[in-house]
Amino acid sequence: MKNIPRSILSSSAFVALLMAPSLHAADSSWNVNAAGNWADAGNWSAGVPGATSGTTNADIATFGSVINANRTITVDSNRNIGGITFVETEQYTLDGGSLILSQDGNINAGGARSIRIFSDITLAGNGGIHTFTGNGGASGRRLLVTGSVTAGAFDTTLNLATASTSVAAVEVTGSISDGAQGGSLSVTKGSNGSAILAGANTYSGNTVVNAGTLILAETGSLTFNIGASGVNNSVSGVGTATFDGSFVLDLTNADTAGGSSWTLVDLGSLSIATSFSDTFDIVGFSATGNVWSNGLYSFDESTGILSTIPEPSTYASILGGLALAGVTVRRRRA
């Protein structure tokens, strides 16, 4: 056989590579009226969306009205995806494995049924915003996330949005936390309607209610990391916050000096409307009326401020000063 020039071989290989079918999909829709595995290409209209490595995949997975009964999709481990959209008429459940949402990746439940995500979710990207949107519009219809939600290697924000103004369209019962790789997580509430936090939330970023209502359910908790006076994460915004659950105060690095204070819930400048219910509590504190104390620190529901409690010697000094002031006044008035 004659020798074929290497340039021709290279060109032929390049053309063959271009003509070869892609082994992974771009955007793709679930196209079987059945439960099944995410990783099975036969369940999708254009191949399996996403990847099983990396954190930057841009594919969008769509779950539509092809099903006529509730179906469970089994997710494989570390399924990186650009976003997930539900436009269903029946209920989908994502279970097993784990999902990695690429930067600014969203989960949008816009159909007529509740969506349940039991898989753990990592929010990848650097400084991005990931939005979970629930449709609502009817009692019990919501995007329910029971798996954990964590940041990746970089700081990011989870935005909870609702398409309905009448019901809680998004509920996260899994924990929301910073990433094991070092990324911190913040939470915002956008658009009207309500969103519920019902898990043990330990994220170190701020919580900002830009619109609608954020509800800390009776089963839920928010952790506040207390540092030097005035240094802490907080709840703020122009919307409404309802606290039925617990505050957990990490006082490991808290200032102990008299006069130190921290705004946990901003009731002043940002005009957030709040409600502390009868089930609200602060772990390790006891309440007298609307004031919670552990002997060293106190939190006042009416102000949203945590402050140090003066030591008895300080009280004595204050009372002594007040008594002296009283004597001085009487002498001046005599």
Image: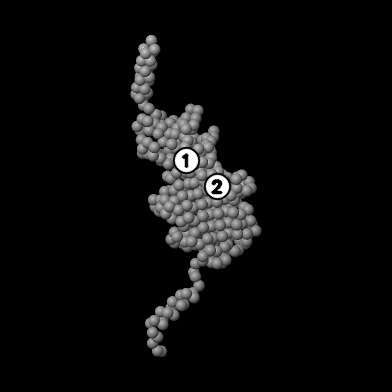
Q: Is residue 147 above or below residue 329?
A: below
Identify the mark nearer the N-term, 1 or 2.
2
Classify mark 1: residues with Cα within 10 Å, few (<14), some (14-19) or many (20+).
many
Quadrant occupied by the N terminus = bottom left
Judged from the image, the secondary structure of the residue bearing numbered disc 2 is: loop
Can you identify the residue that label 1 sits on?
A: 235
Judged from the image, the secondary structure of the residue bearing numbered disc 1 is: strand
Q: Nearer the viewer, residue 136 or 2?
A: 136
Counting from the top left corner in percent of width and height, residue 102 is at 46, 57
Of circles 1 and 2, the one toward us is: 2
Q: Is residue 276 left or right of residue 54?
A: right
Q: Is residue 145 left or right of residue 128?
A: right
Residue at the farthest top position? 334
Res 243 visible: no
Counting from the top left corner in percent of width and height, residue 329 is at 38, 15
Instruction: Please name the residue shown 49% across and 75% down the image.
Output: 19
Counting from the top left corner in percent of width and height, residue 151 is at 44, 51
Q: Is residue 205 above or below residue 334?
A: below
Instruction: Please name the residue shown 57% across and 53% down the image.
Output: 109
Can you identify the residue that label 2 sits on?
A: 191
Residue at the farthest front position? 333
Identify which amino acid the numbered label 1 is placed on. Val
Q: Nearer the viewer, residue 201 or 318?
A: 318
Instruction: Please name the residue shown 52% across and 37% down the image.
Output: 274
Quadrant occupied by the C terminus = top left
Residue at the farthest bottom position? 1
Identify which amino acid the numbered label 2 is placed on. Ser
